[in-house]
Amino acid sequence: MSGNSSKPSFWRCFCLPRLHDFFIAEFSLHGLGLNYFRTTDFVTSQWSWMKPWIFTTYRVIVALGMLVWISFDIPTEIHRFYKDQTAMWFVYVTNWAFGLLTLVLFTLAIYTLVYNCPPRDNTTVVFYQPIWLLYTVAANAMLVTCIVYWVALSDSDLGVLTSMMGKLKHSLSGAVVLVDIILSAIPFRLLHVVYPLLFGLIYSVFTYVFWLANGYGPFRIGQVYPGLNWSRPRTAILVCLCAILICFLVQIVIYLIYFLRVKLSQCNGGRGYSDNTLKGKSGYGEIGQTLRDQANKNELISVTSMTTLAEPITGPEYGTVVE
């Protein structure tokens, strides 16, 4: 009895080291940065069945579709709902996120064409950091605006919100984001939530300045959305705090989708690996050990902050992962 009681518990041997290393990987200052080992993840799919030419075709179709959509959306909304006042289209946060998402997807399509036509092994994608940052912001912001719309704004008296165009924009755009997160190999980090929060802060300041300037809002003078009325600062601040909470929750959900995507891909022979993770008995614990042993490096392993196994892979779809 005494011998059995002295054995370390499953929690201490297995769970606690993994949690410890997870927090080291995801909540250190490194997790706030935009350095990534396998840069080809920004121009490839997570899934082995999605060959480079298939993924490139997908990227181009989505980018062209978004460009056609926004080219139709802007003049139509301006004429139908804003009395031909072009500046009014840029007042809504949905349009900020929608425009940013279109820009990012178009840029990713160009990058995918450049690096996959023809496919090249051992390629290093350059200037991926700003794309990564903007992709994170666009994905989070688009999902937040869709959620807020269907929870609080879909039944408002504002025509642009209750129209079929408004409903489509606040549903299909969110679906595009979710599908892209699932299909692409672009990583996500929990601490990167600060970038969507900064985006939201900028928009909040914009609405406050808009109110101070007595701008002609779609709802009333100086007011953009119902409830976001800076003449009642407590209510406006409460609305902003609720949006911040939703932003945090959305980032967690995105990260969980990302984690499941990598794990499922790994189980099916896809790109579920990271360059500097090592296969070993302790699994995730070795990732944390790698971070501690390489503290002089300013780079961070991606989910793979939570990935349990990794091994060298070679091939035209993956390139070479150096052990």
Image (spheres, rainbow, N blue to C red):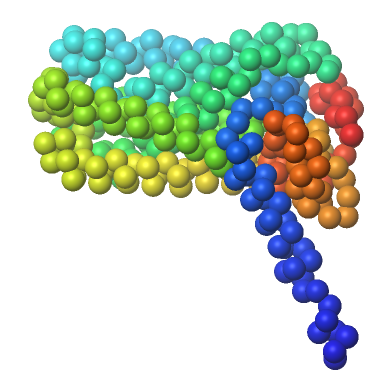
**Residue 266 picture location, percent across and down:** 77, 42
Tell me if I can see residue 221 in this picture.
Answer: yes
Look at 28% across and 28% down and name the residue there.
Answer: 205
The C terminus sits in image quarter: top right
**Residue 143 picture location, percent across and down:** 43, 36
Question: Along the horizontal axis of the image, is 319 left or right of 20?
Answer: right
Quarter assignment of residue 35: top right
**Residue 145 picture location, percent across and down:** 36, 35
Look at 61% across and 28% down and name the residue there.
Answer: 34
Look at 72% across and 41% down and name the residue there.
Answer: 304
Look at 11% across and 22% down and name the residue there.
Answer: 214
Question: Along the horizontal axis of the image, is 51 left or right of 165?
Answer: right
The N terminus sits in image quarter: bottom right
Give the total of numbered labels: 0
Question: Along the horizontal axis of the image, is 101 left or right of 221?
Answer: right
Tell me if I can see residue 46 in this picture.
Answer: no
**Residue 164 picture location, percent across and down:** 29, 28
